[in-house]
Amino acid sequence: MARNLGQQPELKRVMGPGLLLLFIVGDILGTGIYALTGEVAAEVGGVVWLPFLVAFVVALLTAFSYLELVTKYPQAAGAALYTHKAFGIHFITFLVAFAVMSSGITSASTASRAFAANFTASTGLEGGDWLVTLVAIAFVALVGLVNFRGVGESVKLNVVLTIVELSGLLLIIGIGFWAIAGGQGDVSRVWTFETTGDRSVIWSVVAATTLAFFAMVGFEDSVNMAEECKDPSRIFPKVLLGGLVLTGVIYVLVSISAITLVPAAELGEGETPLLKVVQAGAPGFPIGVFGLITMFAVANSALINMMMASRLIYGMAREKVLPAILGKVHSERRTPFIAIVFTTLIAAALITFAGGVPALGGTTALLLLCVFTIVNIAVLVLRKDKVEHKHFRTPTVVPVLGALTCAFLAGPWTGRDPQQYVIAGILLALGVFLWFVTVRVMKAAAQPA
């Protein structure tokens, strides 16, 4: 089975610098900033922009490590591939792959449910939770079909959705600064700390950063598209760093606009913080239009995460960590169709049975922080592995700082909700079970008939 996999056609290289930039920006700008601004404000008060800035710096450190690895090994599979090459331990590689895949599918599943909830509310449909679940499953199935059509079609749709979600955030920035210029709001709030409980300012910022970090993840998904990029070793460094800086600036400006127009206590109530900003700064603006923009934003998150998850599964099958059948490529569409079906079915199951768990977003960030810690260490280990082509090389101190900061933010001392550790533990336990099943299946396939 593994030998047949080597005869599979390569994935189609359709992504140039422009499409890759929009992919990265669209992946980072998503559900996080639209939903988390209020929660971050509840932790630190007016300096809501500071945790986003700290999260950006931590993400940037790890991005440099990803850049060295993706230009050195321009293949699909990302963190799991780097772990496999660095340590060569099947069990660790499988768990990393499972953690990354779970984070992507979980994010896509919760985004699909958010889309369904917004859809049913905006259309006035009544049917309770079962209708939301049904619409979410139908939506994730539609995402799977777009994914199957090909990365070209998927990325073109991503361009449209990215422009829509970006316009929503630029609208918030525009409303905020127009209001400031007109003497509205209170700019002094931007420098005001309002900590919760008996936490110090530093630990409040740390706790808020663990929330804000969820809004920064997504850049790592792009490395799973390396085999579908034109000349990835050359274009990735400028495009990835440019995308991160752009989104970091947007997050800080959105945070400043939001806190200037809406007090921290009010911003932290409910699940639609940016909608309150629109109502406060531009009461005449049709709220339904902004609700539609929010719906497009979460739809984009679902599409990109499902693209990432299917490519990760495909890449790991090619590395013989998963059964070879998951690496099959469709002869006409040249997409990993078995991996797409597999990840879509898992997403549908999560929507049905785990879609309502509120801590899934935090669990996603927790899993990725652990993965990022391993990736930063892998950079240092793989320095001994030389390749023939030129590639990006990050200063040694950067992956060291990246590993330390990511490990620190994953710890319980940050004030992270304990429920997130429970969910992560269950997911990883499931991963261990699947690892044993996979090893047994592959051993059986290797035995002569």
Image (cartoon, rainbow, N blue to C red):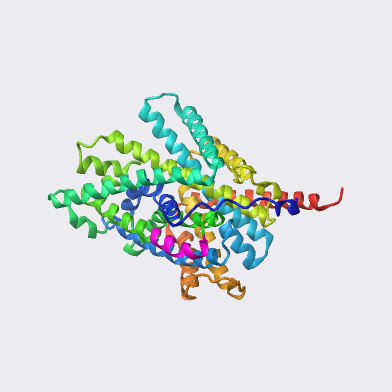
Instruction: State how many labels appear.
Output: 0
- Residue 20 at x, y percent in the picture: 45, 54
Relative vertical location of residue 385 with respect to residue 122 in this rendering, above or below:
below
Q: Position of residue 434 (x, y in %)?
A: 67, 49
The one nearer the camera, 340 or 120, is 340
Residue 383, percent from left and from top: 58, 74
- With 252 as the anchor, is 389 left or right in this view? right
Residue for point 33% across, 50% down: 37
Q: Residue furthest left?
A: 183
- Residue 249's image quarter? bottom left
What residue lies at 66% left-to-right and 49% top-to-bottom? Answer: 327
Residue 240 painted magenta: yes
The front one of 209 and 323 is 323
Q: Quadrant of residue 266?
A: top left
Q: Which residues are magenta?
A: 231-243
Answer whether residue 174 is visible to the viewer in this image.
yes
Q: Nearer the viewer, residue 27 or 102?
A: 27
Q: Is residue 164 left or right of residue 442?
A: left
| In the depicted structure, whether residue 340 falls above or below residue 421 | above
Query: Residue at position x 60%, y 72% from top?
Result: 388
Q: Main secondary structure of the magenta part?
A: helix
Q: Is residue 195 visible?
A: no
Was residue 322 drawn as part of the magenta stretch in this picture? no
Percent position (x, y) of residue 420?
Answer: 50, 50
* Residue situated furthest right in the rendering: 449
